[in-house]
Amino acid sequence: MAGHRRRRSRALSEPLVIVGNGMAATRLVDELVKSSLGRYAIAVIGEEPRLAYNRVLLSSVLAGETTSHDIELKPADWWRDRGVTLKYGCRVTEIDAGRRELKIAGHESVEFSRLVLATGSSPLRLDVPGSDLAGVHTFRDSRDVDLLLALAARRRPVVVVGGGLLGLEAAYGLAKAGTPVTLLHLMDRLMERQLDGQAADLLKTLVERKGIKVMLNADTARIVGETSVEGVALAEGRLIEADAVVFAAGIRPNTGLAKEAGLSVNRGVVVDDAMQTSAPDIFALGECAEHRGICYGLVEPAYEQAGVLAGYLAGRRTAYHGSVVATNLKVSGVSVFSAGDFIGADGSEAILLSDAKRGTYKKLVISDGRLTGAVLIGDTTDALWYLEMIRTRKAVAAIRRDMMFGRAVAMPAKAA
Ligand SMILES: Cc1cc2nc3c(=O)[nH]c(=O)nc-3n(C[C@H](O)[C@H](O)[C@H](O)COP(=O)(O)OP(=O)(O)OC[C@H]3O[C@@H](n4cnc5c(N)ncnc54)[C@H](O)[C@@H]3O)c2cc1C
């Protein structure tokens, strides 16, 4: 009887198809099965030939701190027990929004009642001569990491292009394995979108201590080599010898499917506050989505979007209003936190504490009596406390004298 009821309720479930089997998709399913179990027959179709994994931890896999197997987000029986149909190793090639049907490469068509695009981003390859030579790599998925690990084992010189989070992580992983690494960054400081000049200088010093050679203002003009990489030529004429190049110079949201289906697309797939695209019953979230002009390239906004979308699909009137972006992570083994207005807009004040020898730097930006931005290098113990203050915009007058020294000093009763 129970089995009969289950079959019956499944037959009545609406087919909800999610394209992409990454971090946003997994969080959405997790939220959906809690809020609307039985309402939808969920199918997840993903191009990567494995169960969804924590992409953030690819850096740890590359650094030899964990294994590829250990980063799976959910085990196979988690998906099975929740009745989710998983098709992985399957690329969706076409969406017919009118007929509510999509095509999988070399396979069948799949019908949907509601569709969610969670297709993430692709790494950018610089458009310079030689970028298609053998030995040019990117750093996005577990296949890339397998290739980079094989590269690291050869211990031949590698150039990493891009001094943002991904470039630093790629450089750190390779250097840790004993590979001579030169990191090229076009700008005059590392992680310029998260760090002010002083913090970036300290990070550079700490990164160089790990054996990575960092070159700033380095404009990659071409990759040199006959059939495979032999070096990288800079615009100012210098040549850096290398057996391989890793591009970590940005990402582009995967919007091709949406564009061809006639959905509204700017940089990402345009969504409203319910994460709905320009087509009814087609939604998008995560790195492929653009909300109020912003494409987020981080996990936390994707998870917030998943919570809102799951609520909406469960019939609640939920809305996403955007995320206060924070970076709180280990970059090349160094703890880094940055949030809000970390540079300091006109009229703001900054409190600074810097101890280069100990490898720590703290900057708090205050505007109109509220904490509006923060940068921490080395010691990030109080990062979430500062983030909470930035998000809630609470007045800080009462704790201003001590807040620089952390929560335990500024609010001893609450921290205890
Ligand atoms: C090495 C690395 C380190 C990172 N570190 C951090 C960090 O410290 N903190 C942080 O916040 N973020 C970090 N990020 C970014 C974070 O991983 C992403 O923001 C997050 O994975 C986005 O989730 P998503 O589901 O939108 O995209 P993804 O996780 O990329 O998932 C998208 C999936 O869709 C699949 N797909 C695409 N097109 C199709 C198609 N046509 N058919 C079927 N499947 C398709 C893709 O193959 C992919 O598996 C890091 C990223 C990398 C690569």
Image (cartoon, helix red, strand yellow):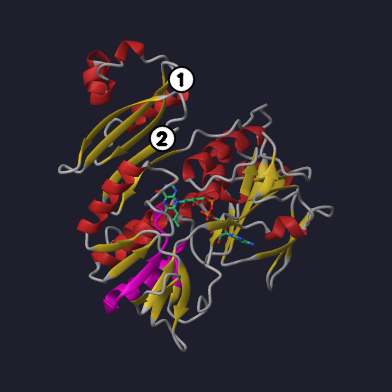
Q: Position of residue 222 (x, y in %)?
A: 48, 75
Residue placed at 72% from the left, 44% from the top?
A: 277
Q: Using the image as rendered, state which of residue 314 and residue 64 is in the foreground.
A: 64
Q: Which residue shows up at 83% across the image and 55% down it?
A: 99
Q: Give the percent coordinates (x, y) of residue 415.
A: 25, 20
- Would residue 300 appear left or right of 117 to someone viewing this image? left
Q: Mark 2 to mark 1: distance in Å?
A: 15 Å
Residue 253 vs residue 13: left or right?
A: left
Out of 383 and 47, give the one closest to the viewer: 383
Q: Quadrant of the image for the N terminus?
A: top right
Q: Mark 2 Cα within 10 Å, few/some/many (few <14, many 20+)?
A: many
Neighbourhood count class around disc 1 (C-alpha, 10 Å): few under 14, some 14–19, many 20 upward: some
- Residue drawn 78% across and 45% down? 279
- Amino acid under disc 2: Phe
Residue range of the region highlighted in magenta in the rendering: 137-165
Q: Which residue is mark 1?
A: 393
In the image, is the residue at mark 2 within 8 Å of ligand 1 by its beta carbon? no
The numbered mark at residue 296 is none
Magenta stretch contains residue 138: yes
Q: Secondary structure at mark 2?
A: loop
Amino acid type assigned to the residue bearing label 1 in the image? Arg
**Residue 205 part of the magenta segment:** no
What residue occupies the far left of the structure in this picture? 357
Question: At numbered mark 1, what does the secondary structure look like: helix, strand or loop?
Answer: loop
Q: Residue 169: x and y, percent?
A: 35, 57
Can residue 146 be seen? Answer: yes
**Residue beneath label 2, please?**
342
How many marks on residues? 2
